[in-house]
Image (cartoon, rainbow, N blue to C red):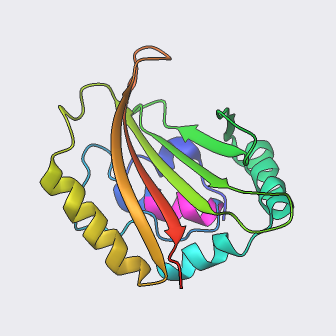
Amino acid sequence: MALDAASAVTGPRRALRWIFAAVLLASLIVPATIVDPQERIVSERDADRIFRLSRSQWEDEAKRLVQSEGWKVQPGPNDAGTGVITFDPKTGVGLAVRPLFPDAQGPPETLVVGSYYPTGTFRRLTDQTQKELEATTGSDLGPGYTLTVSFSIMTSPPPGFDVVEILITRARR
């Protein structure tokens, strides 16, 4: 399913369907203006699918997203895997996905899902909201995964962004 990036991010539910359909995670919900801890972030089924990809399979998917969906390659600090990102120019909200691979053959160790909001959207992510996001997402993912929610402020590129990231890893068995 290929939807227009600008229209996809205008509604939280539409953004949900669009972003993870595009990156094989069919149930990411990223509200356009707030983080609602009651919203489903990532389902177990969708995380299972991403964590089954090899690096070359992900790289093929990332190329497809860039070429046909208008995503951009997201530069990263290392060579652990290509990230992709898209922004809605009307709202300034961005969505990013980056699986982190330890090697060329195996599946990713971590999946990073980032939501980028215009600077000032959040004064800060409260501990309570962070705990609720972690509990809701953890419940959706089930015991096979662990996760961490973090908040940061990016000042570059201007005007900057408030960033909420979810780092997902497979639980040790």
In the picture, the quarter occupied by the N terminus is bottom right
- Rendering quarter of residue 123: top left
Pick the front one: 170 or 44: 170
Residue 147 image offset from top left, x and y in percent? 41, 64
Q: Is residue 17 magenta?
A: yes
Residue at the spot x=73%, y=57% of the render? 102
The answer, for residue 37, to whether it is visible in the render is no
Residue at the spot x=43%, y=78% of the render? 141
- The magenta segment: 16-22
Residue 141 sits above or below residue 34 on the image: below
Which SS type dominates the magenta stretch?
helix
Residue 38 image offset from top left, x and y in percent? 22, 68
Residue at the spot x=42%, y=31% of the render? 90
Q: Is 9 on the left-hand or right-hand side of 97? A: left
The answer, for residue 132, to whether it is visible in the render is yes
Residue lying furthest front: 173
Q: Is residue 26 magenta?
A: no
Residue 33 sits above or below residue 14 on the image: above
Pick the front one: 83 or 36: 83
Residue 149 image offset from top left, x and y in percent? 35, 54
Residue 16 sits above or below residue 48 on the image: above
Residue 28 image offset from top left, x and y in percent? 45, 64
Residue at the spot x=24%, y=47% of the render? 34
Q: Is 21 on the left-hand or right-hand side of 155? A: right
